[in-house]
Amino acid sequence: MTFTFVTLFQNLIEGYFQDSILKRALEKKIINVDYLNPRDYTLNKHKKVDDTAVGGGAGMVMNPQPLFYALEELKKNDENVHIVFLTPVAKPFKQNDAKRLAAKSHIAFVSGRYEGIDERVVEEFADEVFSIGDYILTGGELASLVLCDAISRNVDGVLGNAESLEIESFETPLLEAPSFSKPKIYEDLSVPSEYLKGNHSKIRSLKLALSECKTKFFRPEQLKKHNCTTALGSQIKRTKS
Ligand code: SAM
């Protein structure tokens, strides 16, 4: 799968692929990453890619011409490319979107800067638009990386253990049960005692109960989509009072 980042600031993105899971996915050629800089397409002799807003308003807006040229070339080279614009005003990106988009062969993320992108570019080229939350970032690069990371995890072969995808939060209405690593007792904090007894059926029931508690606490609206079976309090006990 290929990801093309359409950005004025390639450096902001490159580092993310230099370590860990996405670095390995690149090395194994499961994913491929490339970049398009709208500045390379501008006809402006000073290499400008932005201008003041028509009709007034604060700040600069990204000009249509460099982006039209860049995105036309992108589509000419691959008619299957799926073009995604990042913007704070769009629908929020969700896990279902990550899974759905993992089936594409080529996704291009278009990052805005300044006060954003001339709306005609979005109208002309966007297959989809996404926000990563109700706040304003200085540019779309972080948002593009968020989408790329979440999508990549769902591409076959990227994660060492594909099972971890199935039990994760947002796969079902319930959030994932709390996780614990060794030691079993750290300082005076013990993991839930049932986890230590090796009865897998009881551990499964406890995990379900803890998932329900966690969902009720963090995302109560999610519980409406799930039939609750338990009502437990916190299972993390202090071993000393
Ligand atoms: N003037 C715009 C507005 O008020 O809607 C905000 C522009 S923002 C400073 C510049 C760029 O950052 C946007 O074009 C978009 O690409 C990106 N961006 C900012 N916040 C974002 C968010 N929450 N989700 C996705 N992209 C975002």
Image (cartoon, grey):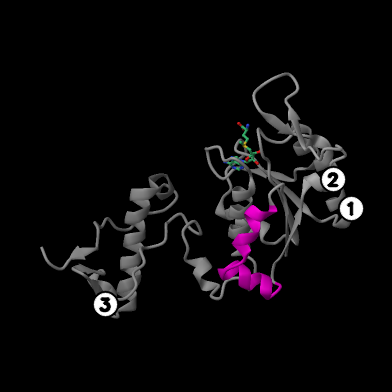
Residue found at x 87% / y 50%:
73
Cα distance in 3D space between marks 2 and 3: 61 Å
Cα distance in 3D space between marks 1 and 2: 15 Å
Q: Position of residue 178 (x, y in %)?
A: 35, 63
Classed neighbour count for the residue bearing mark 2: other residues with Cα under 10 Å, few (<14), some (14–19), many (≥20)? some
The residue range painted magenta reads: 10-29
Element at label 1 = helix
| Residue type at tag 2 | Tyr
Q: Position of residue 95 (x, y in %)?
A: 56, 54
Between 10 and 100, the residue placed more toward the observer is 10
Q: Which residue is mark 3?
A: 196
Q: Which residue is mark 1?
A: 76
Name the image quarter holding residue 234.
bottom left
Name the image quarter holding residue 188.
bottom left
| Residue type at tag 3 | Leu
Badge 3 or badge 1: first in the primary sequence = 1
Residue found at x 34% / y 69%:
180
Residue found at x 64% / y 55%:
13
